[in-house]
Amino acid sequence: MKNLNIKFIFYIPLLLFSFQSEAQFLVGGKISYADINFNNFDSKSKTKNYLFSPEIGFTIKPNILFGFRYSFSSNKNDDEIRLEKETLNAYSIFNRYRKPLNKKLNLYGEFSFTYSILERYNLTILSGLNNLRTFHTYQISIGPGIEFKIAPKWLLNAQWGIISYTNTKIVYREEEEEEEKSKALLVELDPSNISIGLSYLFNLKEKE
C-alpha cells in the first residue's frame, strides 16, 4: 500500500504540469491543532488533535476546477484509564463547477472521490488489553461551497460536505485473537459538515 500511496502523490503534479501553462492553479488547504487538558477532582484527561490537509488544483475551463487533496489527522485521548489513538491518511480527487456572483465571490458545487485508511488503537491501562481496528474506506461526496477573494491571488473558501456514500472494510486485531473482517455501507446527509480553508492562485506563465 505504501508504494501505491507514493505513486499516487507524485503522479498528480506530473499530470498538472502536462497541461497548458495558461491554466490557473490553486494551492491551499487546512491546518488545525488542539491540545486540551481536563482536570476534575477525581480524574484527568488529555486530548490532542492535529489536522494537515493540503490541496492543489487547476482550471481546465474558466469555471471548472480539477484537483487533488491529501489529508492527515492524528487524535489522541488519555484519561488515565484508557488510551485511544487515531491516525488517518486520506487521498481525494475532486472536481468543482464555479458560478461567479461578482468579482470577489464565487459559488461552487464539488464532487469528490476519497480513499482513506484510519487506524484506531485502544489500550486499557490497568489490564494492558489492547486492540487495533483498521478502516479502509471509499467515499463519494457532493456539496456546495463559497469562494471569497480576500486579495488578488488569495481565496477564502467554506464548503459543506452534505451528501456522501461510504463503503468501509474494517479489519479488527486483538491480543491473542485472530483477525476479523467486516464491511459497512453508509449514505449520509449531514449539513453540519462544514470546513474552511485558504488558497493561493497562480499561473505557470504570467501574462505580459
Image: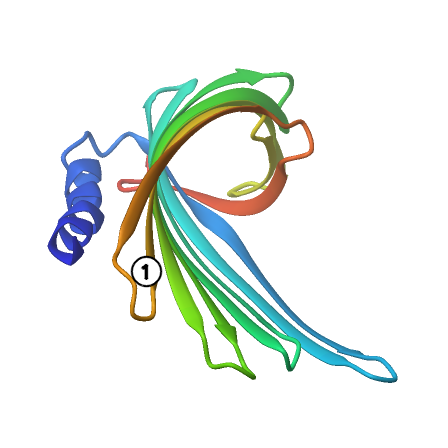
Instruction: Look at the numbered disc 1 and give the secondary structure of its residue.
Output: strand
The one nearer the camera, 179 or 187, is 179
The one nearer the camera, 146 or 168, is 168
Look at the image and tell me whether residue 168 can be seen.
no
Q: Position of residue 9 (x, y in %)?
A: 22, 50
Residue tagged 1? 173
Identify the residue at horizontal 66%, vertical 76% (top origin): 79
Direction from residue 57 to residue 14 in the image, left or right:
left
**Which quarter of the figure is the C terminus placed in?**
top left
Decide: is 129 above or below 22: below
Direction from residue 185 to residue 125 in the image, left or right:
right
The one nearer the camera, 133 or 3, is 133
Most distant residue in the right direction: 41
Question: Which of the 4 image quarters holds residue 77?
Answer: bottom right
Question: Which of the 4 image quarters holds residue 22?
Answer: top left
Question: Which of the 4 image quarters holds residue 58?
Answer: top left
Identify the residue at horizontal 38%, vertical 62% (top origin): 132
Q: Position of residue 93 (x, y in %)?
A: 32, 34
